[in-house]
Every structure is written in C-alpha cells, then in structure tokens.
Amino acid sequence: MIKTMLIAPYSGMAESVKQIKLPDDFHVDIEVANLEDALQLADSVEDQGYDLIISRGGTAAMIQEKVSIPVIHIDISGYDMLRVFTLIQDTNHSVALVGFENICRGAKTLSSILEYEIEMFTISHRNQVRSQLEELKRLGYTIVIGDVVTVEEAQKLGIRGILITSGKEAILDAFDEGRRQYQLLKRAHARVSRYHQILQSLPPNIILVNKKCEIEFSNLSTENDEITNEIIEYKQINQLVWKVLKEKKPYWESIETNKYNIDMQIFPIKQDDSLIGIYIQALKRVEELSPVKLISRVVHTPIIGDSSYSESVRETINQFAKVNERILISGEQATGKMTIAKSIHFTKFGQDNPMLVVDCSLITQEGIQHLVEKVQMMDKGTIIFEKIDSLPLQKQEQLCNFVQNTPNTVQIISLSEQYLESLLHNQLFNSDLYQLVSMLTFYTKPLRERKEDIAAFTSYFLSEFHTHSGNETLGIRKSSIEMLKEFDWSGNLNELKRRLKELSIKATGYYINEDHVHELSVREDRQKMNECMNQENFISITGTLEEIEQQIIQKVYEEENRNQTKTAKRLGINRTTLWRKLNNTSVRESIDKK
C-alpha cells in the first residue's frame, strides 16, 4: 500500500476526495491546510511514514521545499476551468482571473472558445497577488477567479472571490502520477522508518517542539489538533520551554485556555537538546457560555443582489462607515443584519481591528464588566450588540452607562429583530438607551420583499456549496428561479440557503430543474395545510364531507386574498375545479357574508 497524505488547500477538495473511488493500492489520509499551515502539517508527515504527499498550487510548491518525499501536484484541468466559468456565466459584473501562466494560458483559450468575457491577469509570484487585486478593485472589478491565495486576498479587499476547484479528473490524475513516483521513496525509506519507530515508542499524547515553540511532532489524534494549537498559542509557553531547556528538568503546568483546562508536563529530550516534550496528562473541555465573542480578523462578506434595495444597502454601508454615530439595524431574523454590521466594520476599520459581538440575550452584570475590560484594551474597533431587543429592562440601564462611557474610536452597532419604537411605546425598552443606540437607523427588508435578488443569492450559495462541500451542482434553471420566487420565504435567507442545499443534494445532474423545485413546493403546501388544520377551531368537523370541504376552500380562498390561481395551487387542484367549487351556492353565500 502507498501511504499517502493529501493536503487539501480548501475544504471542498477534501470532500470531493472522500466521494471518489480511489485506487486500491493507496492508503489515503486527508487534511485541510493552506500555505504556512500546510507547512506545519507537512513537517510531521514524513516522520509518520508517509510515502508521498498530494496537494495543489502554491501549497504543494511550498511543501515540496520542506520535505524529501515526493510531492504530487494536482493540476487545474480544462474541466475545472469549465466548472468555474459555468458558475459565473449569468453574472452582470466584470470578472477577472488572476493566476500563474499555466492557469491563465489554458483559461484564456477556453474563454475564447466559449466567448466568455473574462479578463486574464498573469502573475509570476504569489506576493504579486495583493497589488494586482488592489489595481483590479480600482478598475471596478467586483468578482475575481483564482486559487486559494487569490480568493483570501480578495476577501480582505472586499472583492468577491470564486475559487477554481479541482474536480475528480485532476485528482485521479494526481494519484496516477503518485504511483509512478513511488519508487523515488526507496532511497530515504530506511531512515524514515527508523525515526518513525523511535517516535512511536513515546507514550501517547506527546508533542515535540523546538526552541521556537514550533511543532516537530505530535502523536495526538487529528481530532485533537485544536488542543495542540491552544497549547502552542498559550502566552507563557515560550517561557516554560526556555525554563526547561535551561534547567534540564521537567515542570508540571496547569493552564486554562479559552476552551480547555489542560494539565501537562514539559520535559527535556535527553537525546536532543534542541527538542522539548510536552506530555498532556489530563484535559477537560470548558463550556463556552460567554456572551462576548471576540473576532480578531473580520472576513469580508459581500452584499449580494442587483436590486435597487441591495444597491441602497451598499450605499448606506459606505455612508455609515464615514461617520462616528451609533447605528441601529432592525429587521426580521436572517435578513442580513450581521452581514451589514460586519461590512460597516470592514469598510471603516479594515481587517486588522477587532470586533466584539455581544449576545444581549445572555449578558449578565459580570458580562458587562468583562466587556468593559475588553474595550479598555481596544484602540479602535466595533462592538455589535446582537438581539438588543431581548435585553431585560434591569440590564438596559447598565448597558446605557457602558455606551455613554465608550470612546468614540469604537463603533457601536445594535441589531434588533423587533422595532425598538414599539417596545419603547409599551415601556419595554429604556428611552435613554434607545436614544443612545439609534443615532442612525436602517431597516432590513425580508426576502419576500426583495425576491428579485433570489437569483443572485442562489448563485452565491451554490458557489459556496461547491467550494466548501465539494457539491457538484453548478447552477439552477431560470424557470426554477421563477418558481422559487413564488415561495413565501418566512425564514428569509436562512430558509433559502437551507432549501437550496437540499435541492443541490437531490439534483441528479449539474443543474437544479423544475421538478426538484416542484417537489419542494408540494411538500411546503402540504405542510401549510397540516399547520392550518392543526389550529384551534380552524375547521369544524361537524356536518357532511361536502360542507367540511367548503369550509376549507373558503378559508384558503380568503387567506390568498381571493386569488384563484394561488388558491388552486395551494389546494392541489386545477383552476377549473376550483371555479366550479367556488360557484357552489353554499360557498358563495358563505363568502358573501364575510
């Protein structure tokens, strides 16, 4: 068996590999890591007896410089380019592709054949990505196609990045190439095997670090990678390592991180003065109940949609980011309030300043004091009070004092699912706090009032599924989009995303068709009918079957504002049958009495 580590630079590749029938002569382990993170992972791969590494793009190139075992590159094929071109074929925005010569050359040919309007920008080193994207942003480009580095840098600049993913064809080609290069491993096999046996003799839960606290080896299981990172990032770990190196004796230490309480022993390695061992003896996960969440680096999320409302949202974000007034964003659940708040922060401060998200439904007096301490350490940044409408009255006065004493270098944005004016009118909200947090206000529209944006959100979500989950669905028929617009979308964007995920999974080809949406529509109508039937005193079951049927038709007809087309669709009958039943004397008389 050829023991192989596949280091996927993005999660969607890992999911794609799991769905492929791999060659029987390979034993494959899969990890998701990119660039520097992948280098750290690759350091231990060779020592664990792997025969080769498979990765892609810049990640593969960087790993190749660090290890002596073969590193197989997953190439970007014409099929991969065709997939990503299909994802953006209906966009109305300017699209650019940024990549190395080998990518741009093939993409240019394919773009010319298919007559796609995509500009190609060739780079020779990944350090050129940032400056190239800044120039593209200046030129008005809003969508950029590229590899992981390009997409990540695009997000930092507020440009929508679409990742060129690798399909099963390119992945299987890489395994074929790996089989051919397997013989290259024999030269170093004996040395690697001996070193691997030594490491395996160590007790479990061991991490080996060098003088710089860089991980040289870890025999913790992959699900405990997070624990390893918590230890390495612990602020006093460097001091403890140097203390052990100097005194040549072990030390016990109990540390508390954001998620764990960890008991560990730090000890010298007698055979190698440059290595320190960390033995994790006991650990206990800490429940995260804190209402305050720190986001150190805010990832830009684009405002999706081509409607006049979406454009007004983008204009509002730019306007609000220029002033130092406190902002209140109100609207139903899942209408984009948090996305707008993050965009204001990103536009105002960029990615390098912190953002504190406070869940007001969980806040306590101690939590407010904890928030005060965090803000004292902030030079500038943003505080988002999420669900401020759920804050109890007794806590509102405390929050009022906090807001008054917050420096103007810190932006305060409050999010509410209810109109605070109504709560204020019913004496359920502190008037002083309302005046403080609502200097500028914005109301988010529910999806049912911006259905012209459903197509744009559908494209965005399908692209996200393809990148992060390896989903093969690339688009949706225009007729299916029109069917989606008939839905109520009471759950707004969360419901749309959930339904699209379901549709993309059930789709048998690359596109979601009318049949898939129709099946969803029928199920939704049945569910609504059941909900109606379960309401107290909704329909009386006394009388004949015909009389009960007349009551149901009458109720649905009224709820659909006497629209016969919608009524027939909801009842699962054609309009002719509905017209006949509506003209039944009993029903007509009953309706006329209303």
Image: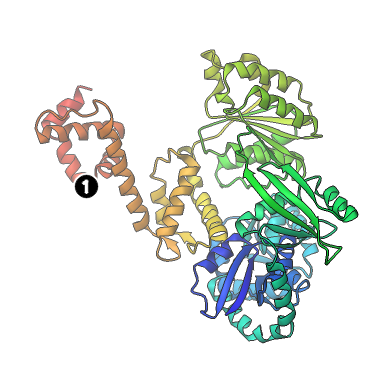
| Side of 389 relative to 500 (left or right) | right
Q: Position of residue 396 (x, y in %)?
A: 62, 18
Residue 69, image x and y in percent? Answer: 72, 78
* Residue 548 image point, x, y percent: 15, 33
Q: Quadrant of residue 563?
A: top left
Where is 23 relative to 126, above or below? below
Q: Secondary structure at mark 1?
A: loop
Q: Residue at x 60, y 42 (%)?
A: 311
Residue visible at 36% across and 56% down in the picture:
516
Quadrant in the picture for residue 198:
bottom right
> Residue pushed farthest right?
246
Q: Amino acid at mark 1?
A: Asn
- Residue density around tag 1, few if under 14, some if 14–19, many if 20 or more, within 10 Å: few
Q: Which residue is mark 1?
A: 574
Apparent side of residue 467 relative to residue 476 in the rendered image (left or right)? right
Q: Quadrant of the N terminus?
A: bottom right
User: Is any part of residue 312 visible from this angle?
Assistant: no
